[in-house]
Amino acid sequence: MNGLDLLLMLRCEIPDVLVLFLAAKDRLEERIAGLTAGGDDV
């Protein structure tokens, strides 16, 4: 299981939980994937 899989699972179980990513992903596509999966841009 990777971080995006975990995020998708969390969003299904607890939709209101805030999720902050700390990752070494630096490509724009990877950052967009994290936000699209439900990561918060707070």
Image: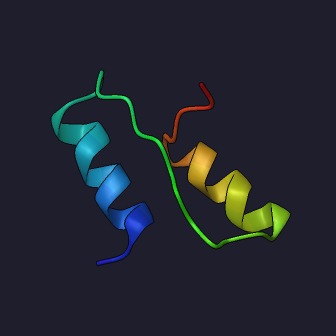
Q: Which quadrant holds residue 12?
A: top left
- The picture places residue 11, in percent across and down from the top left corner, at 30, 39
Q: Which quadrant holds residue 41?
A: top right
- The picture places residue 7, in percent across and down from the top left corner, at 36, 52
User: Residue visible at 40% across and 39% down?
Assistant: 19
User: Residue visible at 83% across and 62% down?
Assistant: 28
Q: Is residue 28 above or below residue 13?
A: below
Q: Is residue 2 above or below residue 34?
A: below
**Which residue appears farthest toward the right when viewing the image?**
28
User: Colour scheme used in the picture?
Assistant: rainbow
**Which residue appears farthest toward the bottom when viewing the image?**
1
Count of numbered marks: 0
User: Residue visible at 40% across and 66% down?
Assistant: 3
Q: Assign the C terminus to one quadrant of the image.
A: top right
Q: Assign the N terminus to one quadrant of the image.
A: bottom left
- The picture places residue 24, in percent across and down from the top left corner, at 63, 73
Please state which of residues 40 and 24 is positioned toward the viewer in this rendering: 24
